[in-house]
Amino acid sequence: MDRSHKLVEYLRSHASVDASDLSDLFAVGERSVRSYVREANAALVGIASIEKRWGGTYELLVTDDDALKTWLADEAAPRAGLQTREERVAYLLDDLLHRIEWITLDDLSKLVYVSKTSLSRDIKDVEKHLSHYGLSIERKPRYGIRVCGPEEARRLCMAGLVVDGLSGGAKTRSRLSRVSACIDRVVDRDGFHVNSAAYQNLVVHIAVALGRISHGCYVPMPEDRLVAIEAGEAFSVARDLAAEVSREFDVDLPREEVGYIALHLAGRRVLDQDQRPDGGGLVISDKTWAVVDEMLAAVKSVFGFDFADDLELRMNLARHVEPLSIRLTCCMRIENPLLAETRERFPLAYSMASEMAVVLACHYGVAPSEHEIGYLALPLILAMERQRSAPVKKNILVVCASGQGSAKLLEYRYRQEFGRWIDTVTACDAAQVSDIDFRRIDYVFTTVPLGVELPVPVREVGFFLDDTEARDVRRLLQWTRAPAGWIASFFPEDLFFADLDVWTKDEALDRLCVEVSSRRALQGDLRLLVGEREGLAQTSFGNAVAMPHPTRPIATTTFVAVATLRREVDWGGHPVRALFLTCISPGGDERRQAFYGTLARTLRSSELIGRLLETPEYKTLIQILIEAEKMEIGDQP
């Protein structure tokens, strides 16, 4: 039963209650009882009030009996309607986050109307959600459980529930409405504009803060940071707003709480600033530079891509992380209209951004949302595009049937059309081909059939290139040559597992990691490291595919273990039927980028993945990988 609901019900059945009786009822001290009374009175405005009489006794004075009955029914109805596991988990999160005292599993099971066995499963989901905020469940024999972790993290988690619509009882709705009215009065009076996204975040922040302050729970703030905030223009408005809220709710907001309100007010500019392409007025701190270093190191460690020398990427990430850090600190939400397209078209960049998000979560205590990860992927997409725009130049041989003069003319034509991809051009007629040293030749372009087998690829073309031929030549020159069957070396046949009979994500990972560990010598516990990574950020991006991987390199050579599943399993909200478990070696590999390009094109292609699921065989896997390798270069993520 909700604490306020329990208190009111008890007082309704007793004419006068001593404070010590309420202490026994809730198993808390009298100070906490006073907090509970203030909390209940805040929710009962205009309906009833709990008054403390001379001698320390409490009485319930009812103003509107019908409204009180409705309020009690509204508080109880959500618990009676908790039909699904998701609904129960949301309710348990909300309940446990608001509690200070311990609660037993027996009492919790009565609250949500399920058995202790079902409740234990729900609690595991609760713990998973709490872990994203650095919170955990503390257990104590005979006392029960409670949420453990920093106050700031608790508030961020509570705010997230409100924003997601998972914490919305009558008490919450009343508080949000009253806070909104306070903000409207102050910003109108002070002429301070707040955009809609910052406004919503501010309302939720203050409402959550009021609930915690009523329990005597405050968020500390370092003095130097508070002094810096007080020097900003938003602080005077924050001070006025804090005074308005204090009058409305009869509660004192300490200096630190006013500082956090000022951060949210300043956040209105952060949300606008982040959309400016020039980043004007944004100061990048030393901490942000250090965080970006760690983000790039994480990408190199897991994916083998080294962006250390890409100054433009560093600057773009730093300009993005500076305001993002404030959004994370203040639990400010933004929407990304490009999220679905980014995740579908650029799964490699999105996966790299997810790895960066792990670093951000460690530094700022909150994991970035999928919308934020989508924005982080954009500078990575541009960085990979820049890497491809300066390819290794090729050495080519052009062959013409009509003599050196015609061959030289053809050489000139190729240099004019494809100069950015060509290093040296050797020209000869058909009769001289047998005298050519092919050790330094990458491709041969010939206007006539040669009739001999050459050690390099040969492309027959017309003397005057039409548009189709020019496009084909351009694609060929952009590709990095690799030995025949090179892609298969990353996808060994003994690590292909068809039609795994599993029901859950954890079961799928258990089975796959056991199989891989029995076949490869690894420098670490694969299942443990993959589990750690799954707990940090999403590895499924749609298209029925997930790409799990360990948190650090543990393989001596890079490989991918592929598994198809007999049925769809839920993978963080996405249905998944194909797993590409990627293990990267610590050392570099000149084919690494080509490998990831092929893998990314495969994962994003519904047609290719559909064929693999329809015919789950190793030869099908290799066929679709080869087709992905040959896709139009412009399609590469």
Image (cartoon, helix red, strand yellow):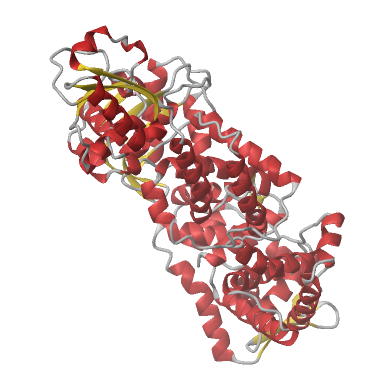
Can see residue 154? yes
506 horizontally vs 229: left or right: left
Can see residue 113? no
Q: Quadrant of residue 301?
A: top right
Q: Is residue 425 above or below residue 331?
A: above
Q: Is residue 433 above or below residue 383?
A: above
Q: Is residue 599 above or below residue 365?
A: above
Q: Quadrant of the N terminus?
A: bottom right
Of residues 212 and 461, the one nearer the viewer is: 461
The picture places residue 604, in percent across and down from the top left corner, at 33, 43
Identified at 20% across, 36% down, the residue is: 464
The picture places residue 616, in percent across and down from the top left corner, at 21, 32
Identified at 51% across, 53% down, the residue is: 375
Identified at 62% across, 73% down, the residue is: 199
Q: Quadrant of residue 58?
A: bottom right
Identified at 62% across, 40% down, the residue is: 311
The picture places residue 473, in percent across and down from the top left corner, at 27, 33
397 horizontally vs 12: left or right: left
Of residues 29 and 377, the one nearer the viewer is: 377
What is the residue that sits farthest to the top in this orientation?
Answer: 435
Q: Is residue 212 above or below residue 148?
A: below
Count numbered badges in the picture.
0
Q: Quadrant of the C terminus?
A: top left
